[in-house]
Image (cartoon, coloured by chain):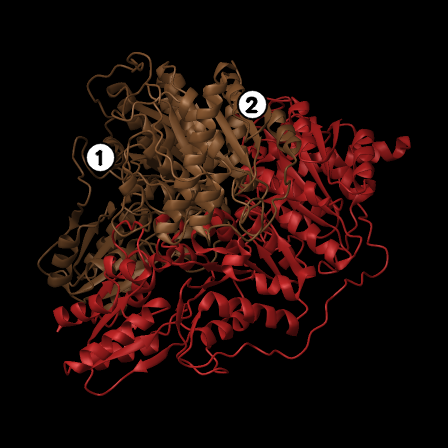
Chain colours: A brown, B red
Amino acid sequence: MPEHDLQFLSELAAQLRVDSVRASAAAGSGHPTSSMSAADLMAVLFSCHLHYDFSRPDDPANDHLIFSKGHASPLLYSLFKAAGAISDEELLTFRQHGSRLEGHPSTRLPWVDVATGSLGQGLPVGVGMAMAGRLERVPQHVWVLSGDSELAEGSVWEAAEHAGSEGLSNITLIVDVNRLGQRGPTRHGWDLGAYARRFGAFGWHTVEIDGHDPGQIDFALSDARNTRRRPTVILAKTRKGAGVVEVENREGAHGKALKEPEQAIAELGGPRSLTVEVRRPAGRAEPYRFGGGELALPEFKIGDEVATRTAFGEALAALGTARGDVVVLDGEVADSTKAEAFATAHPERFFQMYIAEQQLVAAAVGMRVRGWVPYAVTFAAFLTRAYDFIRMAGVSQSPIRLVGSHAGVSIGADGPSQMGLEDLAMMRAVHGGIVLYPCDANQAAALTAEMADLSGVAYLRTTRGATPVIYPPGERFPVGGSRVLRHSPSDRATIVAAGITVHEALAAADLLAKEGIGVGVLDMYSIKPIDAAALMEAATTTGNLITVEDHRPEGGLGDAVLDAVSELGPRVVKLAVRGLPGSATPGEQLSDARIDRHAVVAAVKRLL
Amino acid sequence: MPEHDLQFLSELAAQLRVDSVRASAAAGSGHPTSSMSAADLMAVLFSCHLHYDFSRPDDPANDHLIFSKGHASPLLYSLFKAAGAISDEELLTFRQHGSRLEGHPSTRLPWVDVATGSLGQGLPVGVGMAMAGRLERVPQHVWVLSGDSELAEGSVWEAAEHAGSEGLSNITLIVDVNRLGQRGPTRHGWDLGAYARRFGAFGWHTVEIDGHDPGQIDFALSDARNTRRRPTVILAKTRKGAGVVEVENREGAHGKALKEPEQAIAELGGPRSLTVEVRRPAGRAEPYRFGGGELALPEFKIGDEVATRTAFGEALAALGTARGDVVVLDGEVADSTKAEAFATAHPERFFQMYIAEQQLVAAAVGMRVRGWVPYAVTFAAFLTRAYDFIRMAGVSQSPIRLVGSHAGVSIGADGPSQMGLEDLAMMRAVHGGIVLYPCDANQAAALTAEMADLSGVAYLRTTRGATPVIYPPGERFPVGGSRVLRHSPSDRATIVAAGITVHEALAAADLLAKEGIGVGVLDMYSIKPIDAAALMEAATTTGNLITVEDHRPEGGLGDAVLDAVSELGPRVVKLAVRGLPGSATPGEQLSDARIDRHAVVAAVKRLL
């Protein structure tokens, strides 16, 4: 590399450090030292290797850059300033009320694909982008900047396994090995070999460099982009707080503005106003897209017994035929979740993520960034493994689709480890989340298609066992709606149910009718948003509500109903799974949990 | 090994296969083929290497055996039968209503330390047991039987990193590499080298064997127990369904009873009734225990401003001084959570788990099995990373203690990735869970000590910023209780708050009082179980409740209150964090989220 280039890179890196110090000083908080260690790495990336058009952040030819170490946001924003994307004035709004420059990067900025700040998520999400890039056959590259501390997260190794085994050469992990975590030294310190052995074992190309040497960085980044058939990890030995004696390579300097920012800026050679011309992608990308056609959802005959998971699988395959943008990700249980139907129909858009639920969800987030409509599917119980990723998808406002099968005690003999009993609580609490829970096959099919275009994290809950088809094919079930299944002017209570318990509620209503007790039945297939108007109406006309759900009493259907009618205040009785189930038949389970028809009948009688 | 021993092992393995087939046939479901692949491995372990007294399952000298591949429960129960722990009659109750022999092993059986069935959890929990064994200086050994599919879980690699780096030689992972997952072939098939490279890179001793050769198994198990300074992984090449042509090494035979059980049993040589004398531990173990003394909790002066996280940290250190059984596990954020105070006072009982929250929680579960009282501490937001482990701790009814700091928007400028806003929903839904949320330093200290002896998964939520001390030192705050902070006969509403919002509620009450509007204030420091009586009383006397919480509207304090008063039906207005926060000061955050004093005042006025 010519001397004047090296000099520019060195000056640019100094500017990035200065600006990181300035932004943090203006905020009075932030992570300048974690920014300073990676300044040289990013200076070279932006100047020589990144292909990105800041005026067209959605250009599919753009590379992707993920700051997995989101706390190094001062560096990211300083880079945006150097690239001319934001002004110096905006840089100094860092962490202030109303600023786009949040403490950790968020998608409020058009150049940030996903929110980061929960460590160990950048690589798994980047893997999803790389999978999409491969599917689209475009030459874009995914660059992930990671800290060394976060390599302790198992999610990093799920991603390392997937990228290594699939030979995703279009992703590069740049590890800023500054040896110091938040609390003290990392486990491996500057032992780059420890990391290299691990990534090497997972099939990665590994490069170990001095992360403050622009020549070495340049070589490594070239090497990474040019390596075929394997992803590359660049292990860069750096010094936290590099460039300022007060903090360089010292413990106790994590996550704080510098005490003497003016002195630090002087030590770094003062402010500069260099600009970096980030290279735009060469030409327009034409991402490969699959064709589509008419949507022909499967149709099920009223009275037949069909599991909602089966209807979901068939509908998903039909949706894939109608829409070329739908992709499906499986947690190695597609035969059980019935996503297998999609795998058979559209094998090129079906991704086996094996038993790695964090990577399963992260890949969906990454593919979504590039415009795909991903359905990530596993058992409802095992989505709990990915809750932090789901939470962060909510923060990113990423419209991924999650489907959890085998919900509730009604799975039967497999026992509580396999029962999704916390999933409604977990999914309802996600920012902007949508929670759907069909009770019959035609409803499941309709909701599977309906959820494709929803904004926000959307969740569909399916049931293992066969249930009677009660709705005719072709009906629509809008999100936020509900269905009145039983209603008469003499109703003295309304049973509010969803999924498997709808059938118990209907049976209970029949039993009560025989005794001359009229009760209404509401099918709340949309648990979030919930049809508050229908609930208020039921509460007003019948006065009493009984909710019944195959889920824990906390955070599920019952709580959603109580919330919807809270300002009106009807009497509400909540039936839910309160004990610890063991093994039993589905019928025995519903009975033991006191959420079957007889429990509903008893609850109605107690109430009246 | 002498020929007659080899013949016994071969016969015993055949019996285990026969009994796995019989149990599954009786149940009509289960995982016989996943049991058959590991039968030789377990026959040799039970006959020659396991030290276990079935009549004294709590003997600290016992080895531990975890079936991480919990679906191979027919094999485990067949082993229990062979060891004389259960009868053949009980074996045939497998998966039936009321049986202790559930689809996946549960702690209803005295010889099962932790429930399994969510894959990839056995090794991390085993690591916790091995950590405890080392702390106790007893010679017990931890054996974990794992499938090959589950090695895709990141949690396995968090555990591999911890055990490898810490040199835990008292744990052995036995991987039943039968090459077939649930849906089809695993990623690496029979490539034992792929696994050996990975574990080797993480510092493990690796042994590759034929998993159906008793001599090789015996050698490997000896080698594992005798290896010093490193954990051992035994990678055993096996055939799923080994011994029965109908299913051996065939796809599509996962998780089903055999079609022709009688024929399979005949092929395996028919039923046998061998018994295996599992070797009892030699002598009594005397686990090292730390001394204790009087509990002297820190005391805070009314009116001072102290963060509840600070009080928690100091109380934890004091608790450690009083009780030698308390251990603390940190997710590399002890300086922020203030668990650092314990590290300083009791470094030998403080465990740095680095940024690996699944291993953090799993280690707590494992240490609890051996009688320790573990506090696992990180940011509330990052406990979401471990939700599946927390859920399974609930299934195991394991009384671990979790503490989440930096809850809610009130953390300020760091932004939503760092804000625990879903934790109350997540923790409330855990079976048998307890959720505590102190508002001041003395209350935080008291609850930190109070939670030590609670049954079930107990969670304490702490706040980043300093809040006024409002309770005198020394007061008790029983679980399930609450405190009336403001009350007069003329109250027209009651504000129900917890944690940070208690102070906003008090300020709102003051503002309203100036306008002549009397409102009560309830401090619901115990969110689960909740003080329903106090809420009913408030609902009855004031008619209107306003709940205010620094959490999403779903699944938190508001939902808990609605549930408690649901049969009475007062009007309830719920204030909670509905939007997506950005960066701002704590005060701005509370205001933006409309959970500050002014929002409470406005809500009261709207209601009246």
Left or right side of B255 for A392: left
Return the x and y of residue B608 as percentages of the image width and height.
12, 74
Identify the residue at image location x=46%, y=37%.
A358
Count neighbours of disc 1 (C-alpha within 10 A) and say few if under 14, some if 14 to 19, many if 20 or more. Answer: some
**Callout 2 environment at 10 Å: few (<14), some (14 to 19), or many (20+)?**
some
Camera-nearest residue between B283 and A272: A272
In the rendered structure, the residue with mark 1 lies on which chain?
A
Task: Point out which mark residue A216 bears.
Answer: 2
Where disc 1 sits, the SS reads: loop
Q: Which mark is residue A302?
A: 1
Gap between marks 2 and 1 measured at Cα: 68 Å
Type of amino acid at the residue the image marks with label 2? Gln
Residue type, label 1: Ile
Residue at the extreme left:
A489
**Horizontally, is A218 left or right of A93 in the view?**
right
Which of discs 2 and 1 lies nearer the camera? The answer is 2
Specify the quadrant of the image occupied by residue B586. Answer: bottom left
Residue B107 shows in this picture: no
Q: Looking at this view, name the residue that lies furthest to the right.
A: B2
* Residue A132 at least partly seen: yes
Number of marks in picture = 2
Q: Is residue A112 above or below residue B403?
A: above
Front residue of A351 and B442:
B442
- Tell whether A480 sits left or right of A28: left
Callouts 2 and 1 close, C-beta under 8 Å:
no
In terms of secondary structure, where does tag 2 sit? helix
- Give the x, y percent position of residue A26: 35, 50
Residue B561 against residue A378 in the figure, above or below: below
